[in-house]
Image: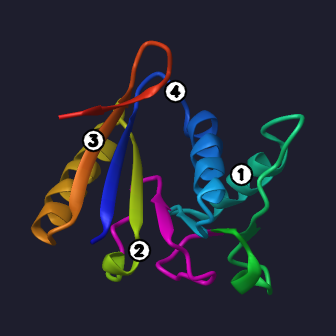
Amino acid sequence: MTEVLFYHLQNMSLESVLPPLLEKSLERGWRVVVQSTSQERAEALDAHLWTYRDDSFLPHATWRSGDLADQPIVLVIDEDNPNRANIRFLIDNAAVPADAESYERLVLVFNGDDPDSLAAARGAWTQCKSRGFEVTYWQADERGRWQRRD
């Protein structure tokens, strides 16, 4: 069964939160797709993932690359799964894909300070529950560590 995790961003940026989550996914041996809703955002994330830390980078490619099947992380702007990913990150109000049940995990990251993002997350929560997915909600504590909330 597909597990869907909702990560509620408050007082933190996607750019600070996404790289560690991607690193954890790679440590588990998973292939990853990150879906944005705009080409500009995907391109900005592409640059960020190469430089977010001085001592590391995340190996990845964008949908424009030719060798996507071999990439551990692929940034996309549509519902494709070009690297047969196990986990899909949905950012910038990207919709839950029609083939959501083909993933082990979906991670929906949303900005809790943006009314549109909050509304999109609520709609996705309802949709995922109605599709029978295991749904959990995560929020960072005062130290920035993710805590499951019920």
Mark 1 or 3, closer to the camera: 3
Label 3, secondary structure: give it.
Answer: strand
Report the residue marked by disc 2. 103
Residue shown at 70% from the left, 85% from the top: 69
Residue 93: within the magenta? yes
Residue range (magenta): 75-97
Left or right of 6? Residue 132 is: left
Whichever of callouts 1 and 4 sits on the residue coming sooner in the sequence is: 4
Amino acid type assigned to the residue bearing label 4 in the image: Met
Residue found at the very far right of the displayed protein? 55
Q: Position of residue 9 (x, y in %)?
A: 42, 33
Amino acid type assigned to the residue bearing label 2 in the image: Tyr
User: What is the quadrant of residue 18 in the picture?
Assistant: top right
Report the residue marked by disc 1. 44
Image quadrant where one finds the N terminus:
bottom left
Residue shown at 20% from the left, 64% from the top: 128
Tell which of 13 and 139 is nearer to you.
Answer: 139
Establish if 149 lies above or below 4.
Answer: above
Left or right of 123? Residue 51 is: right
Whichever of callouts 3 and 2 sits on the residue coming sooner in the sequence is: 2
Mark sitting on residue 137: 3
Compute the Cα span from label 1 to label 3. 27 Å
Whichever of callouts 2 and 1 sits on the residue coming sooner in the sequence is: 1
Q: Position of residue 75 (x, y in %)?
A: 64, 66
User: Badges 3 and 2: C-beta atoms under 8 Å apart?
Assistant: no
Image quadrant where one finds the C terminus:
top left
